[in-house]
Image: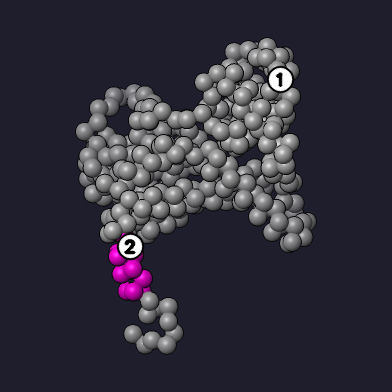
Amino acid sequence: MKETSSQPTPTAPRTAPQAPAPAALAAKVRTLAPSMTRSMQRVAETVAGDPARCAALTVTGLAELTGTSEATVVRTSRLLGYPGYRDLRLALAGLAAQQESGRAPAVTADIAVDDPIADVVAKLAHDEQQTLADTAAGLDTVQLGAAVTALTAARRVDIYGVGASSLVGMDLAQKLLRIGVIAHSHTDPHLAVTNAVQLRTGDVAVAITHSGATSDVIEPFRVAFEHGATTIAVTGRPGAPVTQYADHILTTSTARESELRPAAMSSRTSQLLVVDCLFVGVAQRTYDTAAPALAASYEALAHRHDPRTTR
């Protein structure tokens, strides 16, 4: 059983996260800006909006440009995942080079109430693609590999999520079950805690929450952590409360939130990408048993998809 105190402190992942690649910088800003102070938001949005100009600035120059302090610039750099401002400048230079080569995606406007349906399709498709690209660019593959290892060896997997995240949890549970991994998705918070109490070392608990602050997800996740289960948090806020109890943190991205496009839409897209990465990783590690199990599930259900059968 893991040791805890009455006032839990953040638990560091077992493997240190890597600094984001240049392509992930804009995604990091979009994901973390809502939780930043206003001064840090100014720094983050400035460097993401004009990386070429900012890459040429010293820490003093960027502080003057954004009307903040050198300490704020350094803190923002670290919050974005870079050890210091020098590392952020290198990433900005790389991002600027990508934009000059034409690889950076164009930014589209939010969906308007009077948009033609063709424009709605185009804008949604662009935002979905951007969300997936941002999530892929920012996903820590070391953390992902560790999570796959834990799931591969798990005696049992419990998954917690509510609302749109619960749909993603059910998707993960279904995928794992089809390759022989005992997995259950819990959407009732009382049953989730009841099941979490039964977890032990060798089990895995997965929390899926974009905000990272959903109490109905955090409570069973905390209980699972305290009972020795390996814990995996899939969240859009790497410093959120749920990460206090996470052994491994997988960060998702999200598109710009608007009146007609709530965060739940784009967060679901990025969560499903992470779920698919986890599933494929486990299937690769357990291929000798996963392939026959998947084939057996297909065969068992095949008649339900064939209108010529009467069984």
Image disc number at residue 200 = none
Q: Which residues are magenta?
A: 290-301
Q: Amino acid at mark 1?
A: Ala
Find numbered disc 1 in the image and state the secondary structure of the residue it sits on: loop
Q: Is residue 110 left or right of residue 77?
A: right
Marks 1 and 2, the one that precedes in the sequence: 1
Main secondary structure type of the part rendered in magenta:
helix
Q: Which residue lies at the image location 38% right of the left edge and 30% below the top edge?
A: 15
Circle 2 residue? 291
Q: Is residue 167 magenta?
A: no
Q: Which residue lies at the image location 65% right of the left edge and 14% below the top edge?
A: 59
Q: Which residue lies at the image location 49% right of the left edge and 39% below the top edge?
A: 139
Residue 194, percent across and down? 27, 47
The answer to whether residue 219 is above or below residue 51 is below
User: In what quadrant of the picture does the C terminus appear?
Assistant: bottom left
Q: Which residue lies at the image location 59% right of the left edge and 18% below the top edge?
A: 86
The answer to whether residue 50 is above or below residue 194 is above
Q: Amino acid at mark 2?
A: Ala
Q: Is residue 107 left or right of residue 176?
A: right
The answer to whether residue 162 is above or below residue 72 is below
